Amino acid sequence: MAEPEAIVLSNNFEDILNEQTPQTQAVISLTVYGLADTEIADRLKITHGAVRSCKTRFRNALYQAARERRIWIPAQLHTKANHDKQQAGAA
């Protein structure tokens, strides 16, 4: 069995990202790059709300992938609101 870090950082994350819309892919890429939501909105010429929506959609996709055992999400990365109901997907 692979180390947890290897599972988290595997290509599965990229596969899930590639399943998203181009706008969501851009938002997540810029987020990983370190830009703030307002900077992302300005750069992509979308609203701040659209940035938040993209992030929420991607977070939901990650949790769905965890429930399907496509990806493992460490408990430390769970959002407080989703921690209890999503913990089963983090195993």
Image (cartoon, rainbow, N blue to C red):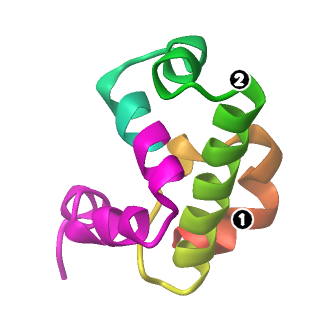
Query: Mark 2 = which residue?
Result: 48
- Report which quarter residue 85 is drawn in: bottom right
Q: Which element is circle 2 on?
A: helix
Residue at 63% in and 29% down: 46
Q: Is residue 43 above or below residue 64?
A: above
Query: Mark 1 = which residue?
Result: 86
Whether residue 66 sits left or right of residue 85 in the image: it is left
Is residue 34 among what the camera can see?
yes
Stretch of the chain drawn in magenta: 1-27
- Report which quarter residue 11 is drawn in: bottom left
* The one of 55 and 84 positioned closer to us in this rendering: 55
Q: Earlier in the sequence, mark 1 or mark 2?
A: 2
Whether residue 18 sits left or right of residue 48 in the image: it is left
Is residue 74 among what the camera can see?
no
Q: Which element is circle 1 on?
A: helix
Magenta highlight: main SS: helix
Viewport quadrant of the N terminus: bottom left
Residue at 71% in and 37% down: 50
The picture places residue 16, in percent across and down from the top left corner, at: 42, 69
* The one of 10 and 19 positioned closer to us in this rendering: 19
